[in-house]
Each structure stands twice: as C-alpha cells, then as structure tokens.
Image (cartoon, rainbow, N blue to C red):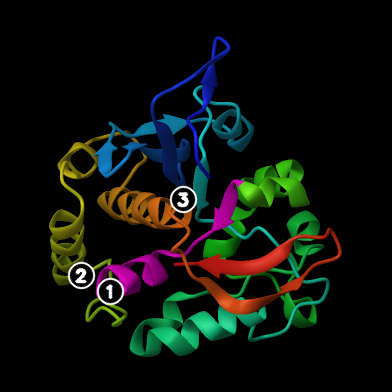
Amino acid sequence: MTGGPIRGGQTLPYSVVAGVTPCGPGWLVAGAKLHGTTFAPEGPRVIKSFGEVLDQRPTFSVIALNAPVGYPDESTPTGRSCDREARSLLGRRGAAVRSAPFRISLKDGVGVGGRKLDAVTLSLLPRYREVAAEMAPYRQRTVFEVHSELSFYQLNDDEPLRFSKSSEEGQKERRTLLEDRIPGVDRILESKFEGVSYSHLLDAAAFMWTARRIFARIGMRVPEDPEWDEEGLRMEIFR
C-alpha cells in the first residue's frame, strides 16, 4: 500500500487512513496522514453516509470499519468464526463482541430461531445496510472490519482491558493507551459533535491506529484463515 492518493492527476506526498464507526448522525471518521514515519491525526468528521466515506477525496488508503463486512447465510448463537475467536482472545472482555446477524436479518431484523435481534444490533441495522449495499470483494483491499476491544487489546500489548468503556475507569484506561501511542490524539478526543459520545471518539481513534497497522502490513486478521460468505467477502476482524 505505497504511494499517496491522487488529486488532480498528481500523486500526493502522503497517504490517508481512517478509523470509521457508526454514530447517531451517520459515521464518525478519524483520519490521519501518513508520510514515512510521520503519523499525523486530523480533526475528526461526521459524514452522513457510508457511500460518502468511500467517496472522500483524497481517498483513504485504508478504512478500519466498525461494522460487519461479511455475513453468514445462517445465524448461530455464537456467530461467525471471527466473532468466536475474538471472544477467545479477549477473555474477560469477550462478551463485548456481539455476533454479526446473518444476511437476511439485514432485511427483516429477525435473528436465531425467529427471535428479534438484540436492541443494539437493531439500532445499527440501517448503518449495516449501508455497508452491505456498498461492499464487494474488491473493496476488501481498502475496507477492513475491526472491533474496539480488539484494537485496544493490541494497544495494550495483547492483553484484555480491565474495565468496560462505559465506565469512567474504562475511559481513562483507553485514553491513556491512546495518548501513549498516538501523538496528537487529543485532536480527536477533545472534539464535540451532537449525537457523538466520548466512547465513539475513543473507538474511532483506536480504529485509526489499527488502520495504520493494516497500511503497514502488520495488522493481524482474526482468524488467520477466514471463512468467506456467499457474496465472496472474507469474514474476518483485524487488530
């Protein structure tokens, strides 16, 4: 993934990566410019649709996306193999990994055994539908599924965090890790948008870090040998 994005027929002297997570108004995007060893976070933005995220100029070399990319054709209580392996890695924090719905659930909101999906997944279905409408196998050269607990697991030297991100202790724990690794991350963490929580900002910054790792080809996929869905999409989560 070398060479910067194109603008006006010229190659830019840098590349841009982004962590992207759904939020109330749309998608929170935390981008950073990469040039050699320089990693410079930019001010975050809220973008209305996922299609607009993909169409940004200069284009993102890597998008670390907090939403399912590949979907199983049938739902199981334990989810995809990437969901199960992520929980195993995370130990005490594994319960934070929800199973991705199966593909038909995107239309009818029905999960295992005809039961309604959980409230959080139901609230995110409109965002998931946006991603599903845009995704194709070739986009997996740029768009990579991530999860906040796995990104912070990696930031914490492959150790699960102690506290939930919904607690004050958990937010302090996450902020400390980000500030230790990303100079200038306060540009993201001090931002304020209507409908965007502090947890959203923490997550987006962590995803931006993971996007950098993917760009540098040191990001790790979970599992190492992923399954593929019927749309030809790999079912994997990066950290």
Q: Which residues are magenta?
A: 142-156
N-term mark: 3 or 2: 2
Task: Say which quarter of the image contains residue 46.
Answer: top left
* Cβ atoms under marks 3 and 1 closer than 8 Å: no
* Cβ atoms under marks 1 and 2 closer than 8 Å: yes
**Crowd band around label 2 with a 10 angstrom C-alpha radius: few (<14), some (14–19), many (20+):** some
Q: Position of residue 148 (x, y in %)?
A: 39, 64
Q: Which residue is mark 2?
A: 170
Q: Secondary structure at mark 1?
A: loop
Q: Which residue is mark 1?
A: 164
Task: Say which quarter of the image contains residue 161.
Answer: bottom left
In the picture shown, does residue 176 fall above or below 190? below
Residue 153 left/right relative to 71? left
> Which residue does the image show at 51% across and 27% down from the upper left?
5
Q: Which residue is mark 3?
A: 215
N-term mark: 1 or 2: 1
Quarter of the rendering occupied by the C terminus: bottom left
Q: Position of residue 27 (x, y in %)?
A: 48, 40
N-term mark: 3 or 1: 1
> Which residue does the image show at 24% across and 35% down from the upper left?
192
Q: Which three-letter amino acid code belongs to the residue tagged 3? A: Phe
Outermost residue to the top: 8
Task: Say which quarter of the image contains residue 44.
Answer: top left
Q: Which three-letter amino acid code belongs to the residue tagged 1? A: Ser
**Crowd band around label 3 with a 10 angstrom C-alpha radius: few (<14), some (14–19), many (20+):** many
Query: Which of these two is toward me, 206 or 133?
Result: 206
Query: Which of these two is toward me, 77 or 7?
Result: 7
